[in-house]
């Protein structure tokens, strides 16, 4: 069965790939499918964005507009992890921002999860080391990795600050390690939830709304972009399409590949 490795780099601006900052990702993007203008959501805030990524609907449908869950919110659409489990596709999610787990499903636990309580680059490194040490005979069909350190640095020192750039370079090297270990077996999708400007990401502007999306497959099939103006709500249907599974009818996006 196909294997997919989904990596979310929080607050990762496409310039990091387009210009000479993240040399591994720049090369990966050049040789594979890449867009630097996938759209974030409105509002471009982390939890609303990830609700959109995993529940496949826009914030006005899922009703989460901040990084807290309101008492009343309405998510009727199936969650990506739930759909994977229904189709007997094993998933294993690693993340270092605890609140993110709320976007992984409403009821029950779908797939395996590992929370590393360290939202610095050391937390990012710990998760990557753990994934690198996985025995070859127990690899899941879907690895999910959320890397949260870069967004923290953006809020503290500013987007495109020296420390933001240095952190992005470390993230680049971590993804390179994962790629070197798993690229023979896994398709890779690398994306972000939103960009950032100065010390945040709360308004609608290009630096915040455009995010990178890279897709690699060891099968080397060429892909074309199937739709205009793709957004992060299209990520879940794109992943299902890699497994030849139709997206749930309540999802608002569609496969971009
Ligand atoms: Zn974020």
Image: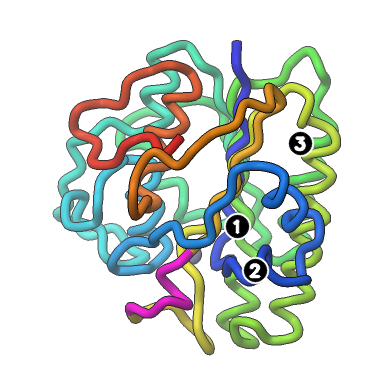
Q: CB under 8 Å between callouts 2 and 1?
A: yes
Question: Assess mark 2: CB under 8 A from ligand 1?
Answer: no
Q: Quadrant of the N terminus?
A: top right
Residue 136's x, y, as percent?
81, 18
Who comes first in sequence, dot 3 or dot 1? 1
| Side (left or right) of 139 relative to 56 | right
Residue 174's x, y, as percent?
80, 52
Secondary structure under tag 1 reads: strand
Secondary structure under tag 3 reads: helix
Task: Give the residue at mark 2.
Answer: 150
- Which residue is at 31% across, 67% downward? 66
Give the mark toward the camera: 3 or 1. 1
Q: CB under 8 Å between callouts 3 and 1?
A: no
| Side (left or right) of 171 relative to 201 | right
Secondary structure under tag 2 reads: helix
Label 2 crowding class (10 Å Cα cut-off): few <14, some 14-19, many 20+? many
Task: Give the residue at mark 1.
Answer: 9
Residue 156's x, y, as percent?
61, 85
| Marks 2/3: CA–CA distance | 19 Å
- Which residue is at 28% across, 31% downward? 78
Q: Quadrant of residue 208?
A: bottom left
Q: Is residue 206 magenta?
A: yes
Considering only vertical position in the picture, is 207 above or below 183? below
| Marks 3/1: CA–CA distance | 16 Å
Residues in magenta? Answer: 204-210
Considering only vertical position in the picture, is 149 above or below 98? below
Task: Give the residue at mark 3.
Answer: 131
| Side (left or right) of 62 relative to 219 | left
């Amino acid at each position: 069965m196909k294997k997919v490795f989904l990596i979310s780099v929080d607050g990762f601006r496409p310039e990091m790939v387009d210009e000479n900052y993240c040399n591994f990702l720049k090369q990966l993007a050049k040789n594979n499918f890449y867009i630097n203008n996938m759209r974030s959501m409105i509002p471009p805030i982390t939890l609303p964005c990830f609700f959109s990524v995993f529940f496949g609907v826009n914030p006005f449908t899922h009703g989460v507009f901040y990084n807290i869950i309101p008492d009343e919110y309405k998510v009727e659409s199936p969650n990506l992890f739930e759909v994977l489990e229904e189709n007997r596709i094993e998933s294993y999610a690693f993340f270092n921002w605890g609140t993110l787990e709320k976007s992984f499903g409403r009821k029950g636990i779908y797939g395996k999860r590992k929370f590393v309580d360290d939202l610095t680059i050391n937390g990012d490194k710990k998760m990557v080391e753990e994934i690198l040490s996985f025995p070859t005979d127990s690899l899941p069909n879907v690895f999910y990795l959320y890397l949260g350190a870069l967004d923290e640095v953006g809020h503290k020192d500013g987007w495109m600050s020296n420390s933001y750039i240095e952190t992005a370079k470390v993230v680049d090297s971590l993804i390179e390690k994962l790629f070197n270990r798993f690229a023979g077996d896994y398709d890779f999708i690398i994306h972000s939830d939103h960009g950032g400007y100065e010390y945040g990401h709360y308004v609608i502007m290009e630096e915040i709304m455009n995010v990178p999306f890279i897709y690699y497959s060891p099968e080397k099939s060429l892909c074309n972009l199937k739709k205009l103006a793709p957004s992060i709500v299209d990520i879940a249907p794109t992943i299902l399409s890699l497994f030849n599974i139709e997206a749930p009818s309540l999802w608002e996006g569609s496969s971009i590949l």
